[in-house]
Amino acid sequence: MQLMSNYFIKTPWWIKKIYPRRLWSMPATEKNIYLTFDDGPHPVATPFVLDELKKYTAKATFFCIGKNVIEHPAIYKRIIDEGHGVGNHTHNHLNGWKTNTNEYLNDVMIASKLFKSNLFRPPYGKLRSIQAKRIADAIADKSAKIVMWDVLSGDFDETLSKEQCLKNVIDNTVEGSIIVFHDSEKAFARMQYVLPLFLSAYAQKGYAFKPL
């Protein structure tokens, strides 16, 4: 179990047990990996990701920030047109632990009006229980699923080297893993290095890359 300064690279079993209704990984019945990208669309990082995915006929899920969808509609359209999944990541990238519940849910609702998805991922992975219980109402979908992760690349962490981020995903990814990358300004230098190498390594091992 690898613990960085304040987060786990590999989500431990006991956290999954505390929040069993949240989606942490997919069934390990086939050699599938589920890549996810948070915080986009971004004018540089997202097109880079899409270009790399296309090389491997890989599909992913993009957890988009509402205000970024408004700023970059053409890039968002490209995500959809190329067959990738999308999810709600709030409108303003709010931290649920630091935000009033009604304000938080209103922010989620604003984002939900920009694109339809039953998938929601809380920024920073931080969500209060009362907020979690009301997410389905906020995105107007009773089938709403709160999506967490099995593996964090750590690409958002400016204290990590790009080589360490690559090691994080190579050492911890297994069949059914949901992996977090970020198509953001902050993460781009590390993600740009890791993603092509990761895709190549796991494609050679016979893995497929699927959307959630």
Image (tube, rainbow, N blue to C red):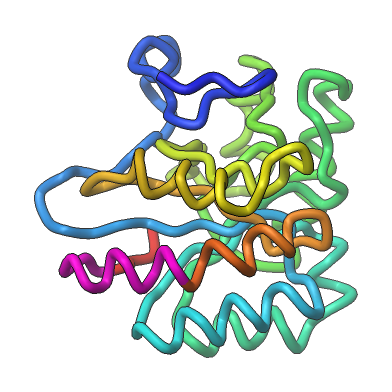
Q: Position of residue 146 (x, y in %)?
A: 51, 37
Quarter placement of the N terminus: top left
Type of secondary structure dominating the magenta stretch = helix
Quadrant of the image occupied by residue 123: top right
Q: Position of residue 161 (x, y in %)?
A: 66, 47
Quadrant of the image occupied by residue 174: top left
Up-down relation of residue 115 to residue 177 (above or below): below
Tell whether 80 sits left or right of 190: left
Residue 32: within the magenta? Answer: no
Q: Position of residue 15 (x, y in %)?
A: 44, 14
In front of the other: 122 or 140: 122
Residue range of the region highlighted in magenta in the rendering = 197-208
Tell whether 40 sits left or right of 57: right
Residue name at image x 23 percent, y 59 percent: 32
Direction left: furthest residue: 29
Residue 200: within the magenta? Answer: yes
Residue name at image x 51 percent, y 81 percent: 52
Up-down relation of residue 159 to residue 67 (above or below): above
Quarter placement of the C terminus: bottom left
Up-down relation of residue 52 to residue 160 (above or below): below
Up-down relation of residue 144 to residue 31 (above or below): above
Quadrant of the image occupied by residue 10: top left
Residue name at image x 59 percent, y 75 percent: 49
Q: How many marks?
A: 0
